Image (cartoon, rainbow, N blue to C red):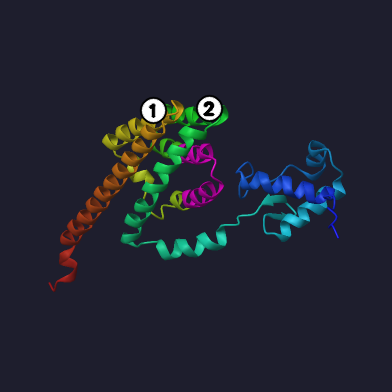
Amino acid sequence: MTERIKPQRVAEAIADHIAKLILQGVLRPGERLTPERELAEKLDVSRPSLREAIDMLAERGLLVTTRGGTHVAQFLSPLLKPLASLLADNPQVTADYFEFRQGVEAQAARYAALRASDIDREAIRGCIERMKKAHEIEDPTEESQADVDFHLAIYEAGHNAVMLHIMRGLAELLRTNIFYSREQLYGRHSVRAKLLAQHVAIADAILAGNPKAAEAAATDHVRFTFTSVEDILRDSMRLKASLLRVERSDYLAR
């Protein structure tokens, strides 16, 4: 007996559509959805069907509904928060992070050069322009934020959903200085100039559709960043040692 194909219910179709937007990174963890009435009109569906779809996605852990509205769930937080506590203040972790990131960044840049759409390329150009403007006015905070956004734009342009979500989660840890202080990194003028040049090289290769050059530029960039971070850590340790010598009298009998 041939099994009958059941037609998809409207609520299931809506849920599938929203889930795809989350998967593709269109809707991001923590973002609040448009109010129910407006979203129903935009999707051209009834509010009861939309409400049922939202309930389905909430059961799957993809959406969270509160009095403040419906938000995309921070579905990686249950993993990342405990991970952050394990990684914090562990010097070896920084080396492990860069070792992992070097391979991922190179592949992401390669994918972006091969797969980027016109919209993706425009987003990458926008990040580079922000970095250049911040560099000109010597705003290391804005420049470092544009740095993170630039790499996220590359992950999006690579159109690999697994890579995008994992690296976006790691970017959140990076914002809290789990691996290293981006403020200290961008506080060094010689480093800032080189980082800008490296980001421009990565962007140029992606925009030119040159996967080999994009991969090489991304590899060089991560390697340089790691070396710079190591220099900062060594300088910090030397300063601490010097301060201890200055304060040595506090530990000695008078």
Q: Position of residue 146 (x, y in %)?
A: 45, 36
What residue range appears in magenta? 148-172
Distance (Cα) linking label 1 and label 2? 23 Å
- Residue sitting farthest toward the bottom: 253
Which residue is labeled 2 in the image? 122
Name the residue located 17 percent from the left edge and 56 percent from the top edge.
242
Labels 1 & 2 near each other (Cβ < 8 A): no
One can see residue 145 in this view: no
Q: Is residue 235 magenta?
A: no
Name the residue located 46 percent from the left edge and 53 percent from the top edge.
173
Q: Residues within 10 Å of mark 2 (few under 14, many from 20)?
A: some
Instruction: Tell me if 240 is positioned left or right of 209 in this view.
Output: left
Quadrant placement of the C terminus: bottom left
Instruction: Tell me if 10 is positioned left or right of 166 in this view.
Output: right
Q: Amino acid at mark 2?
A: Glu
Q: Earlier in the sequence, mark 1 or mark 2?
A: 2
Q: Position of residue 16 (x, y in %)?
A: 73, 48
Q: Main secondary structure of the magenta part?
A: helix
Q: Position of residue 45 (x, y in %)?
A: 84, 42
Callout count: 2
One can see residue 93 in this view: yes
Q: Nearer the viewer, residue 214 or 192?
A: 214
Name the residue located 24 percent from the left edge and 48 percent from the top edge.
231
Which residue is labeled 1 in the image? 137
Looking at the picture, does residue 143 appear above or below residue 91? above
